[in-house]
Image (tube, coloured by chain):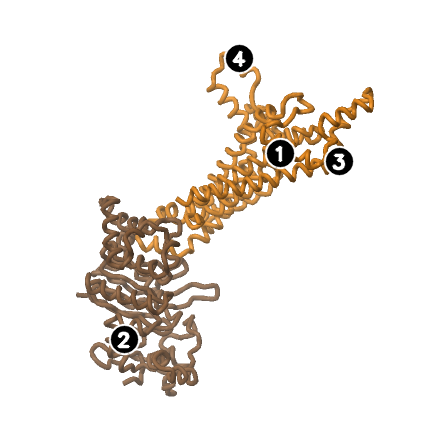
Chain colours: A orange, B brown
Amino acid sequence: MSLQKLIIRRSLEILVIFFVILSGLFLLFHLAPGDPVSRMVDPTMTPEDAELLVSQLGLDQPLWLQYVYYVKNFFTGNFGVSFHYGRPVVEVIGERLPNTILLFTSSVILSALAGIFWGKMVAWHKGKPVDTWVTIISLVCHTLFLPWIALLFIWIFAYKIGGFPLNGMISPELWMDPDSGIFLKTLDIMHHMLLPLLTLFIIHVGSYLLIMRSSMLETLSEDYILTARAKGLNEKQIRNRHAGPNASLPVVTSVGLSLAFSINGGALTETVFTWPGIGRELIFAVSNNDYPLALASFLFISIVVLIANLVVDVLYAFLDPRIRY
Amino acid sequence: MTLLQVNNLSIAYQTRTGTALAVDDVSFALDKGKSLGIVGESGCGKTTIGMGLLRLLPDNALIKQGAVLFKGSDILEFSTAALQDLRWKKISMIFQAAMNAWNPVQRVGDQIIEAIRIHDPGISRDKAKLEVEKLYEMVDIPTNRIFDYPHEYSGGMKQRAIIAMALSCRPDLIIADEPSTALDVIVQDQIIKKIKAIQKKFNIAIIFISHDIGVVADVCHDIMVMYKGRIVETGKREEVFVEPVHPYTKSLLSSYLTLDGVLEFQNESAPKSCLTSTDQAPGTCGFLPNCPQAEPSCASEAPQWQAISETHKALCRFCK
């Protein structure tokens, strides 16, 4: 099947893109102001000690040789030790990345599905009050400022009404209690995730809904919808079997395009909710000159975005046979 | 036996600038197994009639009056459920734009099977597939192409597959709306032959809508010529094409048949656009501004139906 070919070809393309990112980051980090040694040197060190440190870090080597080591280290999984945590970077990333992936895949999937479903319904009732109102609300959601809505939710749901945690991902006392099982722990994470998830959902669902609505309206004027109607299908069958699948294609494209941006926005969300994810870690690492951690965060975020794009591509090919060339 | 009887059908489109009468008081009848051709230039209301028969008109269309009696019962009075049952099972369509008539993300065979099973859920998928194989053999498409996607078909194959789908429920009537217009002449010829053969084999009635007089003359027993939403001449194929009497039919035919005719036609009376018939007051002749045979009295008196023979008549005061 040509679907396999597509996956293989896209994977190879992604490898190339990743290599470009890898090299670009290397250059960026060398161009960036400040240098790692100055942060580690303290006044009690002799110039000899400082030079020793430089040669230990390999910074006195020619640039190309540093690049070779850099690539080799990446492929052997050696990302160095975080200046701040004093632990291997891989460990830190390994703790943070799954939290980010959990929050973002669930928010993207939920908001895309809801956007497709509601957009379909609203398009079907075009011109009626429900269409007008939902369109206005979607536009408002789409233009909301993320940190503001996040803080608003914390204020309303966690502070005023209560019942939701202010921040974090887990309740430490529950996790330290040896009696609490996996079920309780899962429930605890979901409880903590609800507000950040709701925030991201509200920010994203509006644009998916609007895309689906206009795409659906366009699809409904296609000739094959007339064919379906002439065949004697009822309105629900026309909407769900013929119009819906075709109209949702642009939403899938938009999900692919917005993935990188949602990770960016993710840094904000993670910071406001102190969600222990990689976006927050990245901001922290950059502002503290923690070079190894920042570099690895950048790399792993790009890997996640690339893989997510591959998934979207495959999904698209699955939904639309015309692009399986 | 009369299969379809259309009485005084009028259909209007509501537009921002007013109401445009696309079909104006049209009546005709079609017997079982016969074929009727509707010819006329673009915008004269041919397609509106075809769509109106199955009530597939866009939302801004309004059926102002008339009755569409199919086997004695009025389609215009049908409930939604009855209408959905009638569509495709009793009256199916061959569409103008076969390129776009297929859902691009579903396999062609599945779309035909859907048509079969929606009207008879008792038929299993496998049995429906066998049915599709038979239909494909009939329209000369290799059966191993059944489950290909529409974009993997050529234009002619898509059109033949539409014909296969139109036959899938063994309807009594097929409305063929410009079925060959988008195809080149060789494929067009194949399609027309196919339609003729199938019509004869299954004794299906066909309403053939086209602006291509040559094609209509090839397929149809009876011809209706439309102009600005009205039928202006109707009769047997030989009568209308060999001895046209209405001035519009004459100029239409002369524009098609010979090069001389085209030149003459253009010099004499290139008709203005007839996309809207709002400028045509009830009871006046629509062709009057372009008519080479007009007489002063045409402006004040309404055109009248003149019978030339038992089957042949025209809407003109002076045709003989």
Q: Earlier in the sequence, mark 3 or mark 1?
A: 3
Q: Is residue A42 left or right of residue B277?
A: right
Q: Earlier in the sequence, mark 4 or mark 3?
A: 3
Q: Position of residue A36 (x, y in %)?
A: 73, 29
Residue type indicated by callout 4:
Asp
The residue tagged 3 is A33
3 vs 1, front mark: 1
Chain under callout 1? A
Q: Are marks 4 and 2 on the same chain?
A: no
Q: Quadrant of residue A271?
A: top right
4 vs 3, front mark: 3
- The CA distance from mark 4 to mark 2 is 92 Å
Q: How many marks?
A: 4
Q: Secondary structure at mark 1?
A: helix
The residue tagged 4 is A177
The residue tagged 2 is B234
Q: Are marks 4 and 2 in contact (CB under 8 Å)?
A: no
- 10 Å crowding of disc 4: few (<14), some (14-19), many (20+): few
Q: Quadrant of residue B27?
A: bottom left
Chain under callout 3? A
Q: Say which residue appears at 33% left-offset and 59% top-offset.
A: B157
Relative to A26, is B85 above or below? below
2 vs 1, front mark: 1
- The CA distance from mark 2 to mark 1 is 83 Å
Q: Say which residue appears at 61% left-offset and 27% top-offset.
A: A78
The residue tagged 1 is A71
Q: Is residue A324 left or right of residue B215?
A: right
Q: Quadrant of the N terminus of chain A?
A: top left
- The CA distance from mark 4 to mark 1 is 43 Å
Chain under callout 2? B
Q: Say which residue appears at 26% left-offset and 44% top-offset.
A: B125
